[in-house]
Amino acid sequence: MILTNQWRAPARRLFILLIMGTLLTGNAHPSFASPDGRSEQHQTLIGHGHRIILIDAGHGGIDGGTSHADILEKDLTLAISRKLFLMLRADGFDAVLNRLGDYAPSDENKWLRSRSRHMRDLAQRKELAETLPAAVVVSIHINWARSQSKHGPIVLYRQEGRSFMLANAIQDQLNALYGVELNTQPGKPFYLLKKITAPTVIVEAGFISSPIDRALLTTSKGQEKIAEAISSGIAAYLMET
C-alpha cells in the first residue's frame, strides 16, 4: 500500500491502525481470533474483494459523548467497535478501525486547520474514509433520551440509495436483537453523512438512558451481540451490492 503525502502527516497511532487494517493481497491471509475465541482462516466471501469497511468509533478523549452516571458513550462505542472489527476480520472482510484507545481523532488532525476541536475531529474521520478509500463507513454511537422508557437501536442514513440499503440491513438485525420494530431515519444534519462519499450510516446502538438498553450496552456479552448484529447487517448489504 503506497502512502501519499497525506499519510505522512498523521501521527503514529493512526498509522498503526492502518497497519492493522491494511489491505491484504494475494493469498497471504493470516488467521484472526473471533470474539468467542475461535480462530478462523481468512476466506473469500461474497462481499469481500478489497472493499474496505471503516468502523468509526464515536467520540473519544476529551469528547466523552453522552453519559449515564459514570458510564461514558466514548467507552461503549470503542468496546463495540473493537468487537465489530474482530468479527469482520475473522469473517474475511477488510475492516479498519479508526481508534484503538481513549483519544480524540482531533488530537491527530492534519487535514483541517481550525480552532474548533469538533470540526478537526470530524474532518479527521471524514478524510480517513476518503483516503483509504472506504467502500462502507459505519459510525458507532449511543443514544440518550429524557424518558427512560425510550429504547432500542436507530440507524441514521444519508438520503441516498446505498446508504439507505445499508441502514435498513443493519436496522433489521438490531431490531431482531432488541425485539423491537424501529425504522431507520434520515440523518440530514450530520457532517459525516453529508461529507463522506461512500455509503455511510450512523448506528445509534441503544439508549444509555434506558435500563433495558444499558443491560446490553455495558456488558461484554451484550456488546458482542450488538457487534454481531451490525456485522450481519453489513454482510447482508454487501451481498446485495
Image: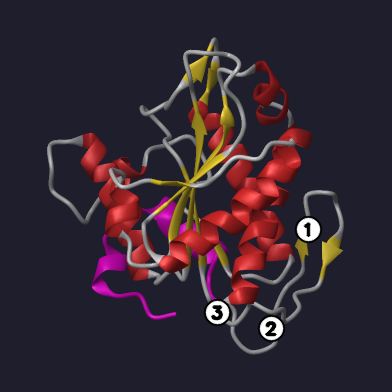
The dot on residue 171 is none
- Dots 3 and 1: beta carbons under 8 Å? no
The residue that label 3 is drawn on is: 50
Residue 240 point in image, percent of width and height:
61, 75
> Residue at left 67%, top 45%?
174
What residue sits 47% from the left and 60% below the top?
Answer: 164
Tag 1: Cα neighbours inside 10 Å, few (<14), some, or many (≥20)? some
Q: Amino acid at mark 1?
A: Ala
Q: Earlier in the sequence, mark 3 or mark 2?
A: 2
- Image coordinates of residue 214 in percent, x first then y, are 66, 23
Furthest residue in direction right, as rendered: 38
Residue placed most toward the observer, 170 or 99:
170
Identify the residue at the far bottom of this view: 26
Q: Secondary structure at mark 3?
A: loop
> For mark 1, what is the residue?
33
Q: Amino acid at mark 3?
A: His
Residues in magenta?
A: 1-23
Query: Does the CB distance between marks 3 and 2 fall below 8 Å?
Result: no
Answer whether residue 19 is magenta in the image. Answer: yes
